[in-house]
Amino acid sequence: MPRDFLKNAKDEYDVIVIGSGLAGLTSANILARQGYSVLLLEHHYQLGGMATWFKRSGGHIFDISLHGFPHGMIKSCRKYWTQEIADSIVQLKGIRFENPQFSLRTTFDRKDFTRILIEQFGIQPEVIEGFFNKARGMNFYDDQSLTTRELFNEFFPGRDDVVRLLMEAITYANGSTLEDPAITYGIVFSNFMQKGVYTFEGGTDALVLKMKEELIRNGVDIRIRTLVEQIEVSPGRQVQAVVVNGRRIRCRAVLSNANIKSTILKLTGEQHFDPAFVEETKAVRLNNSSCQVYMALKPGEGFDDGVGDLLFHSEHNGFDIDAMLSMNVSSRTFSFYYPGTRPGSNRWLIVSSTNANYRDWADLSEDDYQAAKKHLEETTLDCLEQYVPDVRAKLDHIEAATPKTFEHYTRHLAGSSFGTKFEGLQVSRTLPQQVQGLFHAGSVGIIMSGWLGAVNYGVIVSNDVDKFLTPSTPAM
Ligand SMILES: Cc1cc2nc3c(=O)[nH]c(=O)nc-3n(C[C@H](O)[C@H](O)[C@H](O)COP(=O)(O)OP(=O)(O)OC[C@H]3O[C@@H](n4cnc5c(N)ncnc54)[C@H](O)[C@@H]3O)c2cc1C
């Protein structure tokens, strides 16, 4: 008999959350705290979505997306999770850029960037001040037609090197390009510039374990290895139930943390939406995907502290999104994980990340796919040699992930690492107007992606669900 991962699950809940990415986890926690009965369904065998990790023999633990997030995560975790989680968030101070145009180290905050822009790039202080103020003043209701390219042209015309400094890390962090609305850049960049780049001490496994414990304390019914096949909607367009592992479970509301396009077009079905909304959904562009190479050093081997925490390496001249996505990799971000990442551990690991196009990898034959992965590993080691001499001799384990890997584990269409382009946010926000009781929280619109974006979007949408489930009574 196959194991029943829904054993003893109830037949009805107030809310069913589909997916345990950071947005799904946060929503489930808040709604359970508010007293709703919550069922959390996750198809994978571990919680976290892209906030995940994996183990390999020899005691190595690799983090997938723990490279850096803004300081705002401390407040969000304290308010919507626990003080203990917030207390484990620490700053990464060694951010490094190495490319043909410049070589520099920074704490990646406004003060240090201002210094660098003046001293190393010769920009006038009032121009820098004007740029930072404009970026920081941006919000969702601003003019959305201004592109990031136009924003840079306004302040730094002809300065490809400045654009690179200001943009490259953000492109790695959320896949945005110069053609995306400037607000998607301004909001995310300003979040980082506030106080720099942060990480979770203890690793993603420790974070997700702490989150799981808190969910259990708050009464969330958590089920892994449960793939939702359908969101059932009445003819009057009201959510009724979900079908998961072949079982129907009723609910008053569904909050889907699955990809927004899959939620609407696959899990629910086009027939339940206005035709114009279906067209709008189909037109939503996905963000790019990623490749990673995971490298663990032999016990006792390490690298010099001076190598930094996050290194943006490129051999390409100028900021060029096509080059960043190309299989012919010329730009990589290296994350260096010291033993301090997991206090008590004696392991040194390196993860190299590159942005990538899904089709480049998905269309390869199996042989070509394996060869391309091998090539990626080898060229990554070649590149890493200049920062960690003799890395091949020190290496205990190496493997690569591609857009196909991310698609497989998170079920994101085309392995999209950062959800959708900006228009996905509008579709996500207006979903409940189409089907009563159906909500979406997860990476959309660039600004709602990344660790902080996903957590904060989970907060916003759980408030919407709360309002839907408990409408306020009008004053007498
Ligand atoms: C390589 C890489 C590096 C990254 N680096 C960073 C970084 O340094 N900093 C940062 O802030 N962000 C980073 N990110 C992005 C960040 O990890 C994500 O934006 C964020 O974790 C996404 O959270 P989410 O809530 O949108 O859900 P996701 O993580 O997308 O999770 C969705 C969940 O839903 C589940 N699901 C989907 N369909 C179903 C179904 N039908 N039934 C049941 N379950 C389902 C999936 O299995 C998954 O667990 C990175 C991402 C990648 C891929």
Image (cartoon, grey):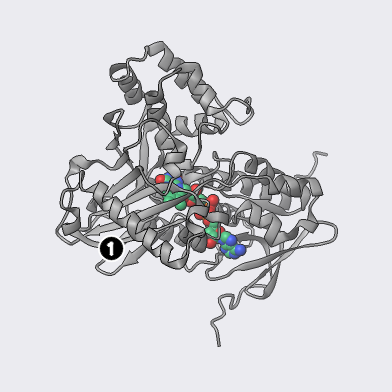
Residue at the right extreme of this rendering: 236
Q: Is residue 77 visible?
A: no
Question: Would residue 163 appear left or right of 25 to someone viewing this image?
Answer: left
Residue 392 location, x and y as percent?
19, 57
The residue located at (72%, 65%) in the rendering is 241
- Give the left or right position of residue 94, taking residue 6 as reference: left
Could you tell me residue 425's position as x and y percent?
Answer: 63, 42
> Which amino acid does the dot numbered 1 rest on?
His
Which residue, given by chain and number where applicable, does mark 1 sit on? Answer: 60
Residue 157 can be seen in this image: yes
Where residue 319 appears, as percent x and y from the top left, is 41, 32
Q: At which x and y percent is residue 118?
A: 32, 16
Residue 375 vertical placement versus 144 (above, below): below
The picture quadrant where one finds residue 295 is bottom left
Determine the residue positioned at 81% across, 56% down: 237
411 shown above or below 225: above
Residue 46 located left or right of residue 115: right
